[in-house]
Image (cartoon, helix red, strand yellow):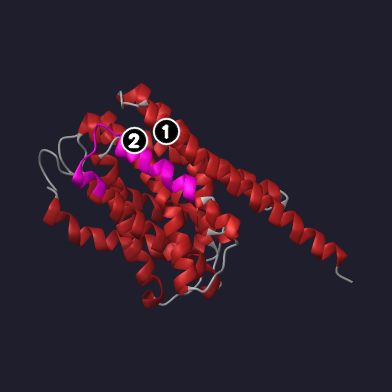
Amino acid sequence: MGWLPAQGRLAAGLLVNLAASICIVFLNKWLYVRLGFPNLSLTLVHFAITWLGLYLCQALGAFSPKSLQPAQVLPLALSFCGFVVFTNLSLQSNTIGTYQLAKAMTTPVIVVIQSVAYGKTFPLRIKLTLVPITLGVFLNSYYDVKFSVLGMAFATLGVLVTSVYQVWVGAKQHELQVNSMQLLYYQAPMSSAMLLFIIPFFEPVFGEGGIFGPWTLSAVIMVLLSGIIAFMVNLSIYWIIGNTSPVTYNMFGHFKFCITLLGGCLLFKDPLSVNQGLGILCTLFGILAYTHFKLSEQESNKSKLVQRP
């Protein structure tokens, strides 16, 4: 997208992530509910296709790999495994509404991590926008008639690991002076190798319900399609965070839950009560307030640059 201006590239990256993220939520949910495809095995397929896609990209000259030490990428690979595994387990164990709204808690957790671990400061008005977002998440989770302790445990672990992962994605790109493709090119195969050792302890490998079980051709095609979309999601996450920030990426991500909630109601008959509707409005109010304040901040910074002699 080098031929596009900076704002056009960012808009294109956001649109790709929006479309791919919504598609993969429904496709993965369909694979879990209708086919019973094993969770960790599906994650391994996603990692493998992500690495294959990046290998083809570098072979076509889209980017040049940069030599990195395994120890430099290992923490990111571990957090990537936890991020995908726990979010998929959360999706498998919860309704789409609870899954998507629990992810909204990633934003305040990232703010805490960046403030405590990296000394980053956020204006008070930005912090206050987290209040309606958190309240909205609480309302939706509390009134979800399919609430389960196990599902919320997976959702909580998913939020914690995802927050750490997204902070590290931005930090590692700046620390190692690599772009999104260069970093993911090393991290994806390392994460795949980790899962290869883990899967046999938790899921069957051969036979009924295993990754090499008697799946139909249509099931195999859907799994491969899920892997291709996962590649687009992973790459766009790295690219957006590298060009903006983890908090901005999460604020954009909150808009996606409106469409996924609607889709969950239509495709999987997930319930949506009046109180959950109020929770959605609270979350949207917080998102819109954050967007307004960030745009005002950017305009103020531009004015200062113009006025500087």
Q: Which residues are magenta?
A: 131-152
Residues at marks 2 and 1 touching, judged by CB atoms closer than 8 Å: yes
For marks 2 and 1, the one nearer the N-term is 2
| Residue at the image position 75 percent from the left and 61 percent from the top | 301
Identify the image quadrant of residue 188: bottom left
Q: In this view of the protein, can residue 296 be seen by the observer?
A: yes
> Left or right: 2 with respect to 140?
right
Pointer 1 residue: 260
Identify the secondary structure beneath mark 1. helix
Pointer 2 residue: 96
* Amino acid at circle 2: Ile
In this view, 44 is above or below 307: above
In this view, 226 is above or below 4: above
Question: Which mark identifies residue 229?
Answer: none
Identify the image quadrant of residue 63: bottom right
| Residue at the image position 61 percent from the left and 47 percent from the top | 291
Q: In this view of the protein, can residue 225 be seen by the observer?
A: no
Position in image of residue 230 (x %, y %): 40, 46
| Residue at the image position 43 percent from the left and 48 percent from the top | 134
- Is residue 177 magenta-colored? no
**Magenta part mainly helix, strand or loop?**
helix
